[in-house]
Every structure is written in C-alpha cells, then in structure tokens.
Image (cartoon, helix red, strand yellow):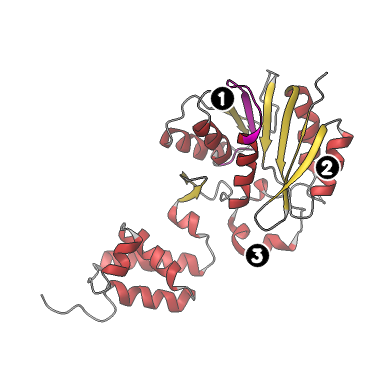
Amino acid sequence: MSPAPPGSTVDEQVRAAALRLGDRNEAARLAALALEQPLAWIFAHGDEPLDPRLIHRFAEMVDRRAQGVPFAYIAGRCEFFGRDFSVSPAVLIPRPETEHLVEWSLELPLPDDARILDVGTGSGCIILSLAAERPNWHCTATDISKAALAVAAINRERLQLPQVRLLHGSLLEPLDETGFDLIVSNPPYVAAGDPHLEQGDVRFEPEIALTAGPNGLELIGTLMAQARYKLAPGGWLLIEHGYDQAAAVCRLMRDHGYESIESRRDLAGIERVTGGTKPAC
C-alpha cells in the first residue's frame, strides 16, 4: 500500500480540526460522526487513510461547528435521560437541567394509570421519557409548531411508544378533556431582547420556543390559568423556568390558587423547576 498523502489520515484530519475548533475531543466526536464509527475507533485508527469523500464530509461538519452550529444539530440527535432523541433546528436541544423535571414527575405519588400532559413538547423528550419509564401512564403532548411535532413523532416511532398522543395547538387549547393527574412543561421563558439570545447554541434554536414577552413570564401565567381547568383535583403542575424566575413563578402559582408550591434545584444549585397542586376540592 502506498503511503497516504499528507493530511489524509484520521489523526491528521482530527488534529487540523482541533486547531480550528480549539477542542480535540469535539473534533474527534465530529470525526466519529462523519466516519460513522465509534469514538474509540477514531483514537485507535489514527493512521487510517481517509477517502476524499469522507474528508469532504468531515470538513463540512467542522465548518458548521466553527460557525457555532450546535453539535446536536449537526449530529441530528441528542441524549436525554439515557435515550437518544432526534433533534433539528425546529426544536430546542434537550438540556440536562430538564431531566430534573422528569425525575420529579417520576417521584410523585400518581396512580398507576395516571393521565399526563406535556405542554410545548418540542422534541418530545419529556413526555416520551415519562412514557418509557411508566408504560401504564396515558401520555399526551401539545405543541404550537407542526415542525416540532414532526420531530416528536419521529422520536415516538424510534422509541416505540405509539400510545403517546401528539396534538397541534397553543398550550392547552387543543384539549377538550380534563382530569389530568400531572401537567408538565418547559415553556418559553426568556425575555424578549435578553442578551443571552445572541450567545451560544440559542442563536440557532427556534425563537418561538425561547421567548415569552418582556419578562419571560407571559406564557407561564397563561399556562397556569389554563391548567387549573384541565387538572384533576389534587393534580400537579410542574414548570421549568429561568435561573432567576423561581420567586416570580411561585408568586404566580399562589395568585392562580395552587397549593403545596415548591421549587427544585438543579445540580448547579439553581432553582430550575417549580411545582404546585390544584386544590383537592
């Protein structure tokens, strides 16, 4: 076998990408993605010559990442609660912080056949995780974005959870029925004009899933009001919110008549999810 031309081996390509991205591990992950190989293979086969087509494919991925496109959008998938979910620019990228919403939901003393609703489901990562963990629960999700629901439907099929209903519409408007034991939501909660919208991954995420009025609380208040009519007596409402919004969300919950209100902290110690119950009578 003749020696590979300069720059055409796995290691040479990864090293060049690492210099551009400033992160060798991320360069290796992109190489694994482009070559459709496990990450361990990339490190074990550094001298492997690469086909020009694979080099071109890898270079395109590196270009996109260098422009700031989130890795999850390049890969088309993201891990959440131990499962792989398809993602696209039509949905938010699932965050580790949101797993606390799932964990709290699973801790609640709900009936074996509980009725669960996820409002603003996006990729479906919350409701599908709950359905996978509690197969007897009756799970429904809504989203205002048809493109987001299409991604959720892909994930529903991949995870083989056909029983999960996906409904199109704003907040709880698509629903006629009442009596939900638990309503969960990771709604838009960023204030319009927040400077964080111009930073990091959120620059590429759908604004409709991020912003909600001048203080970020507009949709949360509407959600609380609508949920009061859809929850069963004693049913729970759990909402993820911004790092500095716990006090305001608790106040809104009290104003809307919820009880047993509390906030849960994420691993960074930030109050990230707030919940309360509809009065039992």
Front tag of 1 and 3:
1
Q: Which residue is mark 2?
A: 250
Q: Is residue 269 visible?
A: yes
- Return the mark for residue 111: none
Which residue is under mark 3?
199
Q: Give the mark count.
A: 3
From the viewer's perspective, is residue 212 above or below residue 21? above
Q: Quadrant of residue 171?
A: top right
Residue 194, position as x, y percentages in the image = 75, 59
* Main SS category, magenta section: loop
- Residue bounds of the magenta highlight: 107-122
Tag 3: amino acid? Gln
Q: On the rendered image, what quadrant is the C terminus found in?
A: top right
Residue 240 in the image: state x and y as whole percent.
70, 44
Q: Is residue 23 above or below residue 137?
A: below
Q: Relative to 100, is 44 on the left or the right?
A: left
* Callout 2 amino acid: Cys
Q: For residue 154, which quarter of the picture?
A: top left
- Picture residue at 48% right of the left edge, 50% below the top: 78
Furthest toward the left, the residue is 1
Cα separation, mark 2 vs mark 1, equals 27 Å
Across and down, in percent, residue 164 comes to 52, 27
**Residue 143, visible in the rendered structure:** no
Near mark 3 (Cα within 10 A), the count class, few <14, some 14-19 or many ≥20, is few
The residue pinned by badge 1 equals: 137
Element on which disc 3 rests: loop
